[in-house]
Image (cartoon, helix red, strand yellow):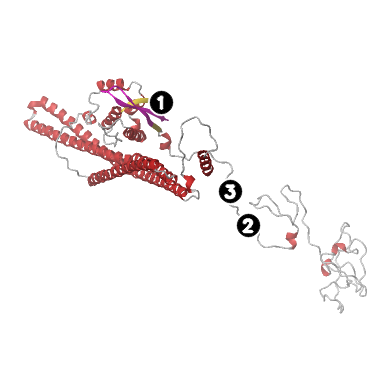
Amino acid sequence: MEDPWADSAAGTPQQPSSSQPDDSRPAASSAPATASSTPSRASRLTPRRLVAQPTRLQAVEDDPLGPLGPLGAAGPAASDPPLAPPAPPVKEQLPLRTTLPANTGSVRRPGPPDPHQIDVDDDAFAQPSGPRQPPPVLAAQPSPVRSTMQPSVSVEQAAKPNFHITVGDPHKVGDLTSSHIVYSVRTKTTSKGYKQPEFEVKRRYRDFLWLYNTLHANNPGVVVPPPPEKQAVGRFESNFVESRRAALEKMLNKTAAHPTLQHDADLKLFLESETFNIDVKHKERKEPNLGESKSVLSSFGINVGSTNKFVEQDDWFHDRRVYLDALENQLKALLKAMEGMVAQRKAMAESAGDFSASLHALSTVELSPTLSGPLDALSELQITIRDVYDRQAQQDVLTFGIIIEEYIRLIGSVKQAFTQRQKAFQSWSAAESELQKRKASQDKLLRQGRSQQDRLNQVNAEVADAERKVHQARLLFEDMGRLMRTELDRFEREKVEDFKSGVETFLEGAVEAQKELIEKWETFLMQLDAENDETVFYRPPVIEGSKPAGDTAVDRARARIDEDSD
């Protein structure tokens, strides 16, 4: 009996048989994957027709599939070989550019995965694996190309001009009555306000003093770096000239680095003018009150001649004034101790020189070379010690002493700024008093009526002018107070940096001097402990004459000394 759900062929229907099963049963009853390989199955290329067949139920004992199986279908013979398991589907290899050749023995190069890569390994279907491990993260390696770019700076710093000023070549000029020291001031700058980026002029000490006073007058409330003080005695000594040169150089560099003072026209005149004296005289004729500190206040028509006692109302300025007084006293005490230490080093150097002369005199009268040689070597060692003490004393003055003196003078400059602020307050008070007088006159005229209208108009104008002066004086005092706060903060920052640098240089110089002394003493002790004691310090006398060198005792001693020294 045929399967009612089976497709019938176009030919004659087959007869059912109970003894011989039909080979054309559906593929689902035997092996679902082998239906296409059965030879008795009708070809799919022939046309098919659905035919309704009658259904008959018949019990089949030998049917292993039960009543649901196709009746009359032929079962597999006992002699037939077992069927092979179905083969898994194989994915078609696509010729993609990103496909890598299958090579299980290759080592994957570490690095980030390619997002366009397609994994087509056939083993991935047969042997499923766990989640893919992430690639190792490599440490950042320094670039072999060294960058030559400078670190970035702010826009304000980039726009700020740079100055590098050196003061050198001090030399004495003039006759006995007008002799003085002239310095070469060499400037390198990036400012566009100067004619050239590099130039050099000649200046003397009073020119530096003129610059300091002028900058103070032009910029009230600003702490102007001061020049070193005058000295009438010993002003042509080499040590004093060198210390003054270093102080003047530091003054100019600090002035040029100040954000306000570097734009002053008088600083440009000082650094650049080739006819400085003529230009200064011409400027003084045009501005006769240039060197007076009241010139800025007088430009507003404000009286600065008031002698009223000033009482500080701001606690911040009061505390700073007390602090500056204490700091000045401490720095003066430190400078005094520093001068005593420098004098002691110079005295030790002088004593070492005297000791060396005495040892040398003793070595000349000693007959035994085993004693005269060490004495003479010790004499030369004392000469070296003397030079070290002299050099260290000079370095102490130029590294640490000059900073102490500079900040003592800077405190004086800060006090001048306090004095200018005090004068501004007194001017404000004077303007307030004048305004009260004008208002009293105005009230008196108003009470008298309109009989003196002309006088009243004049008084009204005077009151308006007095109010304008009061307003200007108050603004000047407030602006000067804000400026001085900024200047004092700048003073504190620079003080910390300068003293830290000065102390480090002072300590480095002291350590180097002690190392040099230790090295000299150790060399001398090694010579004393040498095996050949007779020839280490022996120096044969110098015999004047043109006698050629020969095989004498002196020549042999000289040869031995040369060999030992090598």
Closer to viewer: mark 3 or mark 1: 1
Q: Position of residue 461 (x, y in %)?
A: 16, 28
> Which quadrant of the structure image shows residue 161?
top left
For mark 3, does the 10 Å Cα neighbourhood hold few (<14), some (14 to 19), or many (20 or more) residues?
A: few
For mark 2, does the 10 Å Cα neighbourhood hold few (<14), some (14 to 19), or many (20 or more) residues?
A: few
- Secondary structure of the magenta portion, mostly? strand
Give the residue pinned by disc 3.
141
Closer to viewer: mark 1 or mark 2: 1
Amino acid beneath label 2: Pro
Q: Is residue 117 above or below residue 301?
A: below
246 and 210: which one is in front?
A: 246
Give the residue pinned by disc 1.
199
544 and 451: which one is in front?
A: 544
Q: Mark 1 falls on what kind of element?
A: strand
Q: Position of residue 79 (x, y in %)?
A: 92, 73
Amino acid beneath label 3: Gln
Q: What's the magenta region?
A: 166-195
Q: Is residue 252 above or below residue 367?
A: above
Q: Are marks 3 and 1 in contact (CB under 8 Å)?
A: no
Give residue 134's mark: 2
> Which quadrant of the structure image shows residue 481?
top left
Mark 2 vs mark 3, CA separation in Å? 20 Å
Q: Position of residue 351 (x, y in %)?
A: 32, 43
Q: Position of residue 449 (x, y in %)?
A: 7, 30
Q: Earlier in the sequence, mark 1 or mark 2?
A: 2
